[in-house]
Image: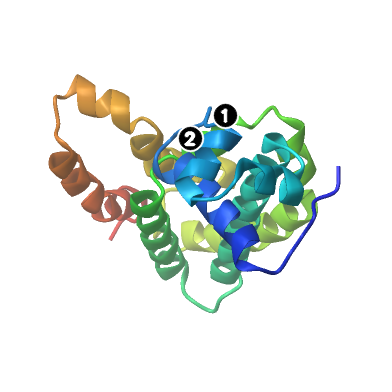
Amino acid sequence: MSIQKKDDVTYELIIKTAKRLLFKEGRFNVTTQEIADAAGINRTLINYYFRSRDALFELVLQNAVEEEEKRREMIVFSNLPIREKLETFIDYYFEQAKKYPYREVYIVTQMNSESICKLNNKDHIKRLTEKFFLELEHEMEKGNIQKMEPIQFVLNFISMLILPVCMRPLLQNSFDLADEGYDNILANRKEVILKSIFKN
């Protein structure tokens, strides 16, 4: 299904509005009429530019995944030491989580969809993991990081990073935490994660 791509303010406004409703407000079932109302436009314009709600959502998802890929590549292929690479990624992730608290949740909900399958760039992932795993194993050999399979390290890192964001509503409710209190917890995550990874 083709999208009528236009380089004008209306096209960008629709994408920006859908992104805000999905990723910032967590309104995953939002309708085209609600998107149109939020953008202050006629609903027929969404159909004109994107043909359907699903096509619009797929484009928003694609943009989010591509943005993540570019950021990961920039960090992994930088000349920074591995600790600084991880610090940079943590800073970026929590900055994005504060701006778009439901983005990660939405991506996870789409994991079994055809959209994600089409966006899954295995060559990109392979290039990143090969370089990162070599650096990781080097740090393990130097004794800076506990020895383990690199994939186990990545699973641990992702879990420490993503789980507090994706599980935020449940955790806040379980521990009776207001937004400010939970924001403070997330603000301290960087130090906690780094201390869990590095021996000194």
Amino acid bearing label 2: Val
Disc 1 to disc 2: CB gap under 8 Å: yes
Task: Please provide percent x and percent y for residue 40.
Answer: 49, 50
All told, the count of numbered labels is: 2
**Residue depicted at 36% across the width and 58% down the height:** 95
Q: Quadrant of the C terminus?
A: bottom left
Question: Hey, which quadrant is residue 172 in on the image?
Answer: top left
Residue furthest to the bottom: 79
Position of 12 with respect to 86 (left or right) is right
Q: Quadrant of the N terminus?
A: top right
Residue furthest to the right: 1
Label 1 sits on a secondary structure element that is helix
Residue that label 2 marks: 105
**Residue depicted at 39% across the width and 60% down the height:** 144
Q: Which mark is residue 109?
A: 1
Determine crowd level at label 2: few under 14, some 14-19, many 20+ residues with C-alpha closer than 10 A.
Answer: some
**Residue depicted at 56% across the width and 64% down the height:** 71
Determine crowd level at label 1: few under 14, some 14-19, many 20+ residues with C-alpha closer than 10 A.
Answer: few
Tell me: residue 14, above or below residue 142.
above
Task: Please provide percent x and percent y for residue 168.
Answer: 31, 33
Task: Please provide percent x and percent y for residue 142.
Answer: 45, 63
Q: Which mark is residue 12?
A: none
Amino acid bearing label 1: Thr
